[in-house]
Image (spheres, rainbow, N blue to C red):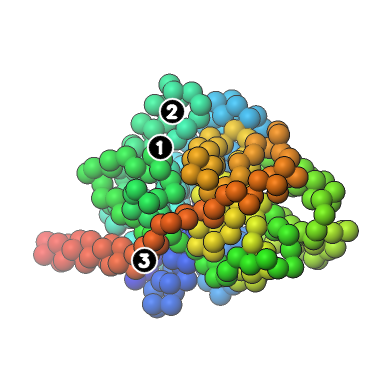
Amino acid sequence: MNIFFPVLNWGLGHASRSLPLIKSYLYHHHHVICASDGEALAMLRRELPDQTVLQLPGYNIQYDSSYMPINMLRYGPGMLRTIRAEHELTKAIVERHEIDCIISDNRYGCYHADIPSALITHQLQVFTGQKLLDVYIRRQIRSWFKKFSQIWVPDQTPPGNITGDISGIDTSPIEKHYLGIISELNCTAITGKYKAVAILSGPEPQRTHFEDLVMKQLAQSPGDFAIVRGRPDIDDPIRKEGNLTIFPYLKRAALSNLLAQTDLVIARSGYTTLMDLANTGHKAILCPTPGQYEQIYLADRLARHDQCVYQRQENLDLASAFEKIGEVKPIGFGTIPEEATFEERLRDLNGITQEAKSAEAGH
């Protein structure tokens, strides 16, 4: 099959969770055309050097304010224009590359009326802190996901899921399938070289604010620490500053090797990060991106289940977090991981493709 696989650039999480699916489809000899923008585009091109990775227009949303409605009012109109633009590009890509199906990781404009498509998303509800705005955005999201043939949720089937209420809504008549925990990280949490590894990601300018806070506090803490800056767009060398070892970016295999040298991770509470940590068994200090209410919801939910130490960026105190980490369990503790079913889901789309071709031949 010829698969078009566009990926949202919103930090590196969407590209990270899409890579296992993309690599599996390549392993099974499908032809995959990927696409994204910004840092996610750079990451996909680094991880898939022999594959075609096209550039799409960027949403260019920044978290200038910790008050989400202000960010939505400022950047929402541009996001809508981008969705329309990526839809027109998708139609051209489908024709030029003879695409059989589309698998879109949260790019709502990447669908086509004549071929089957799946929307990968864990975020079927949005939390902004304002109920009226939530109602409007959820209605808009519902109108977008109805353009797709299926919805794929990268999570375990409830109630043992990470996303909670975010992905739990009814999507009828669009089929919804849970893919299980998806992560390429293959390591075990152990007490090793580093007291903790900080993984930085997310939209600017908050990523840089978080980096500055983490580096300052870790530099004043006893022990050795590693910091992964999450910048695939730069080629800076690895550097050592006192008790800090700083990596500009690590491919997924190298990140696994690094995490095999610690049992504690400091990170945003982005969903892909949570899937990774649920897979590896690391304990976590989670600090949501200010203004990103989904991350606040997820961190708060895990903290209520004693599965993380949750701190807000404006009150970040890693010294106190280190004292509390012995009281919590790893993310996903006590749940039995389900087998990922994304290859079966591709067969579903292939079945829709064959049915469409048969119907067309019948006419």
Q: Nearer the viewer, residue 314 or 72?
A: 314
**Is 2 located above or below residue 293 in the figure?**
below
Residue 268, position in %: x, y? 61, 47
Q: Nearer the viewer, residue 3 or 280?
A: 280
Q: Mark 3 or 2, which is nearer the eye?
A: 3
Instruction: Specify the amino acid type for callout 3.
Output: Glu
Residue 177 located left or right of residue 194 = left
Residue 137 located left or right of residue 41 = left
Residue 331, position in %: x, y? 51, 53
Contact flag, marks 1 and 2 (Cβ < 8 Å): yes
Label 3 and label 2: CA atoms lie apart by 33 Å
Instruction: Specify the amino acid type for callout 1.
Output: Gln
Determine the secondary structure under disc 2: helix
Residue furthest to the top: 132
Of callouts 3 and 2, the N-terminal one: 2
Of callouts 3 and 1, the N-terminal one: 1
Label 3 and label 1: CA atoms lie apart by 25 Å
Circle 3 packing at 10 Å, graded few (<14), some (14-19), many (20+), is few
Total marks in image? 3
Residue 11, position in %: x, y? 60, 50
Residue 201 located left or right of residue 281 = right
Residue 125's disc is 1
Q: Which residue is mark 2?
A: 134
**Is 149 located above or below residue 190 in the figure?**
above
Q: Which residue is mark 3?
A: 339
Q: Which residue is painted at 39% across and 39% down in the image?
A: 165
Query: Which of the 4 quarters of the picture holds residue 31?
Result: bottom left
Query: Which of the 4 quarters of the picture holds residue 360?
Result: bottom left
Q: Which residue is painted at 57% across and 70% down in the image?
A: 187
Res. 63 visible in picture: no
Of callouts 1 and 2, the N-terminal one: 1
